[in-house]
Amino acid sequence: MLSEEDYYNRLVYEAKILEEEEPSFKPVGGDLRVWRGFILGTGLYEGGVFEVQITLTPKFPYESPKVRWLTKTYHPNISIQNKVCVGVLGKDWQPSLSVAGVIEALRNLLNFPNPASPLNTEAANLMKKDMKKYEDEVRKYVTTYATWENLKKSQVEG
């Protein structure tokens, strides 16, 4: 566990890196332990805007950040409970990794789903069985939930 001063210094370091993210991630309420931002979809998720929240626990960097995927998304590795399954948030986490690295892993996961390690078994099974229907379902979710307009609505309602 880091000393309080070292923990704070690591948070400042992470903040400097995150300032460069596009579109940028910002601390929630000025708290450097909680970040919220957007990942822009490409490939099958093209045109989608996905809101993500990243929380750094007191055990960070020895424990991976906690990630909540806030935009409803049809993806084998993103659950309907907003959980994400990607190696850097579990077995592949190392204290030398940065939050920006986690964001990059999330971008890659969005574009390269892994149906062999699903949180959403329905999406994984459809992807394996009928890629065309999977793609149609993804596009439906993107246009229904992952637009700037819909994100603004959910923020007003939430």
Image (spheres, grey):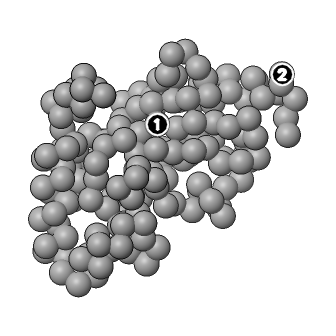
Whether residue 39 is visible: no
Sort mark 1 into few (<14), some (14-19) or many (20+) by Cα contacts within 10 Å. Answer: many
Is residue 95 found left or right of 119 in the rendered image? right
Quadrant for the C terminus in the image: top left
Name the residue located 19 percent from the left edge and 70 percent from the top edge: 134
Q: Which mark is residue 53?
A: 1
Reading the image, the residue beneath label 2 is 5
Name the residue located 57 percent from the left edge and 36 percent from the top edge: 55
- Nearer-the-camera pick, 64 or 40: 64
Residue 79 vertical placement versus 127 (above, below): above
Q: What is the secondary structure assignment of the residue under circle 2?
A: helix
Which residue lies most toward the top here?
A: 30
Name the residue located 24 percent from the left edge and 31 percent from the top edge: 154
Residue 14 vertical placement versus 88 (above, below): above
Please state which amino acid type lies under the numbered disc 2.
Glu
Whether residue 158 is visible: yes
Is residue 27 found left or right of 71 in the rendered image? right
Please state which amino acid type lies under the numbered disc 1.
Gln
Q: Position of residue 59 (x, y in %)?
A: 76, 40
Q: Quadrant of residue 131?
A: bottom left
Name the residue located 71 percent from the left edge and 48 percent from the top edge: 63
Q: Earlier in the sequence, mark 1 or mark 2?
A: 2
